[in-house]
Amino acid sequence: MESNTQNRTIALAALFQCVTGVNQIANTGNVDSDLYKTCLASILKDNPKDAEDLYGSLADLKTGLKTMMFQLGSGQMTPDGKPKELESTRYALGLIHLENKLKNNNAIFEQLINGIKATQEKLEHFDIEHENITASLAELYANTISNIGPKIMIQGDQRHLANPKNAAKIRALLLAGIRAALLWRQAGGNRWKLLIERGKLQRQADAFLLQL
């Protein structure tokens, strides 16, 4: 993976797209279908040509690109007058931290890879949005990432968070977030880059959006 601003922007947009899905479920009990499929597919795709190919296309990351621009900006309100979702940034930073711990845990990483391969085999029988795929990815997250801690505490409506199917989708999206955080690191990203390159990342995201 080439270390450049374009790839880092794609990775960070994908990360924010995953946490946007988490927020949608936590607060409404629903998640955008296309967003969900794009995030989950990134976990299960073999040998992508590049960062963009991992997510299908830049158009498939439109939500993440927009969210990323808002979250990295200095304003407290989005252009449509809604308060900035500070939880999104907290979740994103938490996933970057967890992925950084994962890279130093060979046993958990191997367990994760084997679990992904097992889930890929299930795609021969189920669509990617099928609850069996979600359940498999959610269980994999619980058995791997959750064990390296600290756990990411999700805020939202308890009626939705208490629903087992919603909880499974949230874990599956968090696993997709780990995949995006891995891509971020492979593209040269780290916490310092996130701080000092905010403007550059925003400009690149804006340039991508103008192409759509």
Image (cartoon, rainbow, N blue to C red):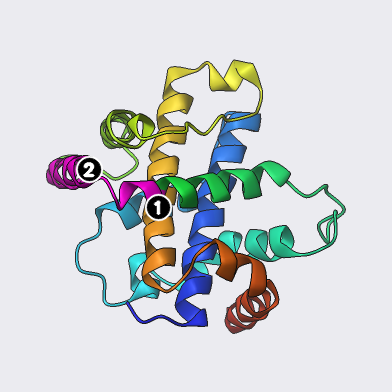
User: In which quadrant is the C terminus drawn?
Assistant: bottom right
Can residue 100 be found in the magenta stretch? yes
Q: Please, is residue 13 above or below residue 175 in the view?
A: below
- State the mark number for residue 112: 2
Q: Position of residue 135 (x, y in %)?
A: 30, 29
Q: Look at the image and give the residue range highlighted in magenta.
A: 99-122
173 relative to 12 in the view: left or right: left
Task: State the residue at coordinates (30%, 37%).
Answer: 137
Can residue 52 be found in the magenta stretch? no
151 relative to 69 in the view: left or right: left
Q: Main secondary structure of the magenta part?
A: helix
Task: State the residue at coordinates (18%, 48%).
Answer: 113
Choose between 159 and 110: the one closer to the eye: 110
Q: CA distance from mark 1 to mark 2?
A: 15 Å
User: In which quadrant is the N terminus drawn?
Assistant: bottom left
Q: Please, is residue 191 above or below residue 117 in the view?
A: below
Q: Position of residue 44 (x, y in %)?
A: 25, 53
The three-letter code of the residue at mark 1 reads Asn
Q: Which residue is mark 1?
A: 100
